[in-house]
């Protein structure tokens, strides 16, 4: 006899298409409940329904929050899910610079750096108004940065670690902000141009540090109108915007569409002008074929890459010979050629985006383990190392992959095939995206997909995660390497470009060749097909940039 009688009851199980969620759904169904499951993957939903039997239904849904917080300083720090144009930053990247690395003014009208590189002085624009009509001054800038760098108890700041070099933020007069550093930093100017460092009203923060989590009050070119959860966000032109003559648009409507096919359909049907993140090659091709001259396409290297985390706490991955063998097995060049036709990846990746100022030249990159073009020689060496480390032919392990189709799915299939060719048997376990990082943080894996994506191509920001585990909570390979830590510190403090390049090369060689703490796969490639009516917008290597929209306009 069942312990519970749930006849006549209905139950919704989020994440009910697999694992514990599916087990719970089955238990509820056995007790008589009418069960609905919610999950992102339609195929997993369909498979789960077969197990649940007649009467169960499935909803294709992502149960993660649509917008984690209106204030990016507090929680998830993902501006691609936040509305554009409502705020300003002190500095920003030049919206016309395709590299996304040229810094220009925003709320600050100028800046100077002291000869020793430790004092940054910014002069603010006068007459800038918040949307409620109050004037923006250095007091607001200081309060906003103090919230990021020196958050009070009970307030989280995901980016506090980016500003460990800051000793103090000062506001000596209403239109001057001074940042005093503990040591010189080669990247600090770019940190001041972070698209997440919005300037808030100091008076509001003084009353309620969490107010911005659920409210909007900025200085940006657009003013908040409405947000309908799961549907859209609307902004209208700010008539009192400090940059006179802008914005060019009267307003915008941002649509929340999670499914990629639905996003393509919205652009094809001209219900949306642009999607800022990126489409797959096949989606680009279908839009070009359907719309012809009505569509424009911009493409760029993308400052994102899928990494392979190798858990140093699990045998045999504590042995660098095994880790090196896994990298040597990969034919990155053949993989790039094949996968670039179907996925948002393109080139073999080192620790910097190919073609950018600090990237290793291709000929030099080929000297690292797994980057040689002689794949037969590399795989022979991989087999030798595995045998030397005592790993038998046919050794089996599990590769945990993130439940996001593009590009995790095709890249995972490719990795497994590459490892098979050196005698390894690999099972793939796909984990729902909402639960995935709990697995990484908990070390509950042998080998797993990891992810690195930056708002600007800058070594400090791209390499910080690879410091020792006591310094970087994002080091999911779980190693301690003080030599790597020292190299990271040296490159960050080097003000001479050539000296900094030297330390970055040494860092890359130790990370990917000497110790193989992580494996880099293929650099992402960003593809933005958009309505040809959209003018004044330039693609960059980061989907976090150029969403201010103040200089965008539409032709007839």
Image: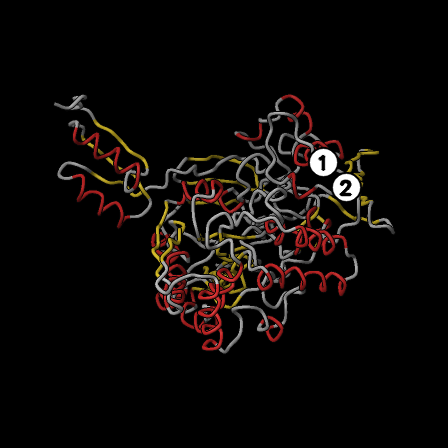
Q: Compare marks 1 and 2 and give the one earlier in the sequence.
A: 2
Cβ–Cβ under 8 Å for marks 1 and 2 = yes
Question: Which quarter of the image is occupied by the N terminus?
Answer: top left
Position in image of residue 474 (x %, y %): 55, 45
Position in image of residue 483 (x %, y %): 68, 54
Note whether 395 is above or below 203 in the view shown: below
Position in image of residue 134 (x %, y %): 69, 29
Foreground residue among 474 and 125: 474
Residue 310 appears anywhere in the view: yes
Tell me the SS state at disc 2. strand
Q: Quadrant of residue 208?
A: top right
Q: Quadrant of residue 22?
A: top left
Tell me the SS state at disc 1. helix
451 horizontally vs 193: left or right: left
Query: Which residue appears farthest toward the right when viewing the image?
Result: 115
153 horizontally vs 371: left or right: right
Q: Which residue is drawn at 49% across and 50% down?
A: 311
Dot 2 alpha-carbon crowd within 10 angstroms: few under 14, some 14 to 19, many 20 or more? many
Q: Nearer the viewer, mark 1 or mark 2?
A: 1
Number of marks in picture: 2
85 horizontally vs 486: left or right: left
Q: Residue at x 48, y 56 (%)?
A: 308
Residue 298 appears anywhere in the view: no
Dot 2 corresponds to which residue? 124
Dot 1 corresponds to which residue? 141
Q: In which quarter of the image is residue 230?
A: top left
């Amino acid at each position: 006899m069942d312990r519970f009688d749930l006849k006549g009851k209905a139950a919704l199980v989020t994440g009910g298409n697999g694992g514990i969620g599916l087990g719970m759904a089955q238990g509820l169904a056995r007790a008589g409940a009418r069960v609905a499951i919610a999950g992102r993957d339609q195929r997993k939903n369909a498979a789960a329904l077969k197990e649940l039997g007649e009467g169960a239904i499935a909803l294709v849904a992502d149960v993660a929050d649509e917008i984690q917080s209106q204030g990016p300083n507090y929680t998830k720090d993902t501006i691609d899910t936040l509305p554009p144009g409502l705020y300003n930053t002190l500095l920003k990247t030049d919206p016309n610079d395709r590299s996304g690395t040229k810094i220009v003014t925003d709320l600050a009208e100028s800046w100077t750096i002291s000869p020793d590189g430790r004092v940054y002085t910014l002069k603010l624009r006068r007459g800038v108004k918040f949307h409620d009509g109050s004037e923006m001054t250095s007091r607001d800038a200081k309060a906003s940065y103090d919230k990021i760098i020196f958050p009070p108890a009970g307030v989280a700041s995901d980016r506090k670690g980016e500003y460990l070099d800051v000793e103090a933020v000062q506001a000596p007069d209403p239109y001057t902000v001074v940042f005093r550093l503990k040591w010189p930093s080669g990247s600090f100017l770019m940190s001041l141009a972070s698209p997440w460092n919005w300037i808030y009203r100091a008076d509001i923060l003084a009353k309620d540090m969490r107010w911005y989590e659920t409210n909007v009050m900025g200085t940006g070119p657009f003013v908040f109108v409405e947000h309908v959860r799961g549907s859209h966000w609307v902004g209208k032109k700010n008539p009192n915007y400090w940059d006179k003559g802008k914005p060019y648009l009267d307003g915008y409507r941002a649509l929340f569409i999670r499914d990629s096919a639905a996003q393509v359909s919205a652009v094809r049907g001209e219900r949306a002008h642009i999607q800022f993140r990126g489409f797959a090659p096949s989606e680009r091709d279908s839009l070009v074929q359907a719309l012809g001259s009505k569509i424009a396409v911009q493409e760029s290297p993308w400052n994102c890459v899928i990494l392979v985390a190798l858990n140093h706490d699990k045998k045999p991955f504590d042995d660098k010979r095994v880790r090196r063998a896994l990298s040597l097995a990969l034919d990155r060049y053949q993989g790039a050629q094949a996968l670039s036709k179907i996925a948002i990846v393109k080139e073999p990746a080192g620790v910097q985006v190919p073609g950018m100022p600090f990237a290793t030249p291709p000929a030099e990159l080929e000297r690292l383990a797994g980057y040689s073009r002689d794949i037969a020689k590399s795989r022979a060496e991989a087999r030798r190392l595995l045998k030397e480390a005592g790993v038998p032919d046919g050794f089996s392990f599990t590769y945990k992959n993130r439940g996001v189709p593009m590009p995790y799915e095709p890249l995972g299939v490719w990795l497994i095939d590459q490892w098979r060719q050196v005698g390894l048997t690999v099972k793939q376990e796909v984990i729902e995206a909402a639960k995935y990082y709990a697995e990484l943080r908990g070390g509950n894996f042998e080998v797993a997909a990891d992810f690195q994506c930056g708002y600007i191509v800058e070594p400090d920001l791209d390499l910080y995660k690879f410091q020792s585990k006591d310094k970087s909570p994002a080091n999911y390979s779980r190693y301690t390497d003080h030599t790597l830590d020292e190299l990271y510190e040296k490159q960050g403090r080097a003000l001479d470009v050539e000296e900094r390049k030297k330390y970055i090369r040494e860092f890359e060689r130790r990370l990917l060749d000497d110790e193989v703490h992580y494996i880099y796969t293929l650099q992402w490639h960003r593809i933005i097909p958009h309505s040809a009516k959209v003018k004044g917008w330039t693609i960059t290597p980061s989907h976090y940039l150029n969403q201010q929209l103040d200089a965008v306009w539409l032709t007839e």
